[in-house]
């Protein structure tokens, strides 16, 4: 989690301070998601999404974070190198903490693909907003899975991916 937090603070260009527990604003989240898209688009050699003005200076809701992650998920999905085994998640837990049916459906999809921690603060938060540390953790989780799915190691260098040797004895 520390690495994820460091990544987010680097992306935001801010220092760690007492603001770590303050809710992340829509403008801050939009800035982070635009920078993430720019970085991942560069790696995937695709055109970044069109820049939009940052949202208002109010706390971003967990549902809005899920919505923005889903937009990026849909952008990057055609570039996934493989489909992972479905990750486990609890539908009842998702429904307990998220009342909107559309948000529940999106959370289930992202959790199934491993882009959201199934019991992380985005899914099970008691507050409608996220603190900086919670947001950083969710962003790190998302970016980690994006990196994993958009890259396939060369079997030449990874013994577990090499085909079995026939014959022998």
Image (cartoon, helix red, strand yellow):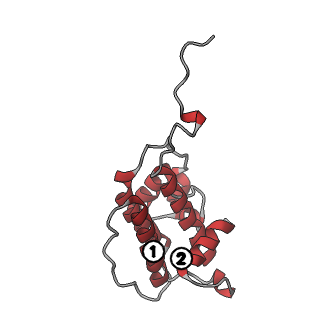
Residue at position x 60%, y 78% from top? 9
- Residue 145 at x, y = what percent? 52, 55
* Disc 2 and disc 1 in contact, CB within 8 angstroms: yes
Task: Point out the image quarter for the C terminus.
Answer: top right
What is the total number of numbered labels drawn onto the structure image? 2
Residue at position x 54%, y 34% from top? 161
Residue at position x 57%, y 65% from top? 140
Q: Secondary structure at mark 2?
A: helix
Task: Point out the image quarter for the N terminus.
Answer: bottom right
- Residue 7 at x, y = what percent? 59, 71
Q: What residue is shown with label 2?
A: 11
Most distant residue in the bottom direction: 57
Identify which residue, 1 or 88, lies in the foreground.
Answer: 1
* Distance between the alpha carbons at the discs numbered 2 and 1: 7 Å
Most distant residue in the top direction: 169
Q: What residue is shown with label 1?
A: 35
Q: Residues within 10 Å of mark 2 (few under 14, many from 20)?
A: some
Vertical placement of 25 versus 98: above or below? Answer: below
Q: Is residue 58 left or right of residue 71?
A: right
Q: Residues within 10 Å of mark 1 (few under 14, many from 20)?
A: some
Vertical placement of 159 versus 3: above or below? Answer: above
Vertical placement of 109 versus 22: above or below? Answer: above
Image mark for residue 88: none
Identify which residue, 158 or 58, lies in the foreground.
Answer: 158
- Residue 141 at x, y = what percent? 56, 61
Q: Secondary structure at mark 1?
A: helix
Q: Is residue 131 visible?
A: no
Q: Earlier in the sequence, mark 2 or mark 1?
A: 2
Q: Is residue 116 visible?
A: yes
Identify which residue, 64 or 81, lies in the foreground.
Answer: 81
């Amino acid at each position: 989690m520390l690495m994820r937090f460091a990544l987010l603070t680097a992306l935001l260009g801010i220092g760690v301070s007492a603001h770590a527990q303050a809710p992340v604003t829509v403008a801050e989240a939009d800035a982070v998601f635009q920078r993430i898209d720019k970085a991942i688009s560069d790696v995937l050699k695709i055109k970044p999404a069109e820049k939009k003005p940052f949202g208002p200076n109010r706390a971003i809701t967990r549902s809005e974070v899920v919505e923005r992650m889903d937009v990026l998920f849909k952008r990057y999905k055609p570039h996934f190198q493989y489909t992972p085994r479905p990750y486990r998640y609890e539908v009842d837990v998702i429904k307990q903490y998220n009342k909107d049916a559309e948000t529940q459906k999106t959370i289930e999809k992202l959790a199934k693909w491993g882009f959201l921690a199934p019991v992380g603060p985005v899914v099970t938060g008691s507050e409608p907003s996220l603190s900086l540390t919670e947001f950083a953790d969710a962003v790190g989780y998302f970016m980690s899975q994006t990196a994993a799915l958009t890259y396939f190691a060369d079997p030449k260098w990874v013994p577990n991916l090499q085909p079995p040797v026939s014959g022998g004895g």
